[in-house]
Amino acid sequence: MTGALISVLLYLAAAAWLAATVARGHVAARGWVVLAVGGIALHGLVHVMDWVATGGADLHFFAALSLVTLAMGVLTTVVGARGRMALLGVVVYPLAALALAGHELRGNLQPIPLDWRLQLHAWLALLSSATLAVAALLAVMLWLQERALRRHALRGWLRALPPLVELETLLFRTIKAGFVLLSATLLTGVLFVHDLLAQHLVHKTVLSALSWVVFGALLAGRWRYGWRGPTAVRWTLVAMGLLVLAFFGSKFVLEVVLGVR
């Protein structure tokens, strides 16, 4: 619990540091990176210690949500430290802190017995969700920046964002990476999950496939027709909404509402 609490405080401190500097239109110092890395390291350590204590990886709803935000925190820190996307941390780090706190308050559950093939499928699902969630946040920022430019009101924290073209390029690079991971997730599901249309998997399977189709159509439209701007934002958010419903929506209903594990 102590490690989780320190991680939460470090995450919030990193977000506050970024908010204070970004409010002036730029990130003036890199101190937030030290805070974020500390929070991420402790966040990961909390899960490792839980796995040691229970004899396996807990991938139930709150643990999975915490792991996804952990991966989002890693991506945000890497991208933010190397460029001008540190602003993502203002949103991602509090989310990671909240998810970790929820996991700790929920307590450890017995790990779901999975062989290495199903574990690979589960970890790919978590990584694809994290990557595409970051893409969804980038899409929202792109929409806000475009709207501000149209209204000639680009000021404050929006000035801390990279130029529109650079932000859009980063968005599609992130979507491509997430699409590859999502494709691998679906492929391992087909290969390793014996009954994809079982009672507890049918909604997840269908919604995940729909999300894959939408992301694929967006990438094809970008390549063939040069889709960008509001079109890219809408397709990204629709696809991410389907993916959230597929993974976390079904897990929330089954595990939290119905108590099925």
Image (cartoon, rainbow, N blue to C red):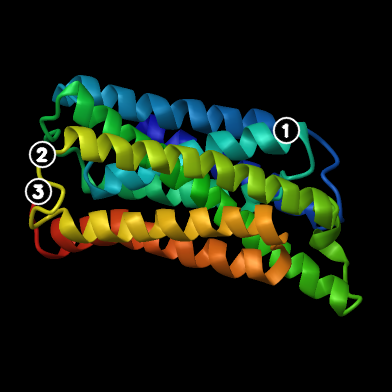
Does the rendering let one see residue 16? no
Q: Position of residue 165 (x, y in %)?
A: 82, 53
Give the spatial CA distance, label 1 vs label 2.
42 Å
Question: Residue 218's spot in the image, x, y percent?
Answer: 57, 59
Q: Which mark is residue 194?
A: 2
Q: Residues within 10 Å of mark 1 (few under 14, many from 20)?
A: some
State which mark lies toward you, 1 or 2: 2
Query: Crowding at label 2, few (<14), some or many (≥20) Cα neighbours within 10 Å?
Result: few
Horizontal and vertical percent position of residue 109 = 15, 39
The residue sitting at 68% across, 71% down in the picture is 230
Between 187 and 64, the one lying in front of the other is 187
* N-terminal-most mark, 1 or 2: 1
Residue on which disc 3 sits: 261
Q: Which residue is mark 1?
A: 81
Which residue is found at the position 15% from the left and 24% from the top?
A: 115
Amino acid at pointer 3: Arg
User: Residue 5 or 175: which is nearer the viewer?
Assistant: 175
Q: CA distance from mark 3 to mark 1?
A: 39 Å
Type of the residue with mark 1: Ala
Q: Nearer the viewer, residue 206 or 43?
A: 206
Secondary element at tag 1: helix
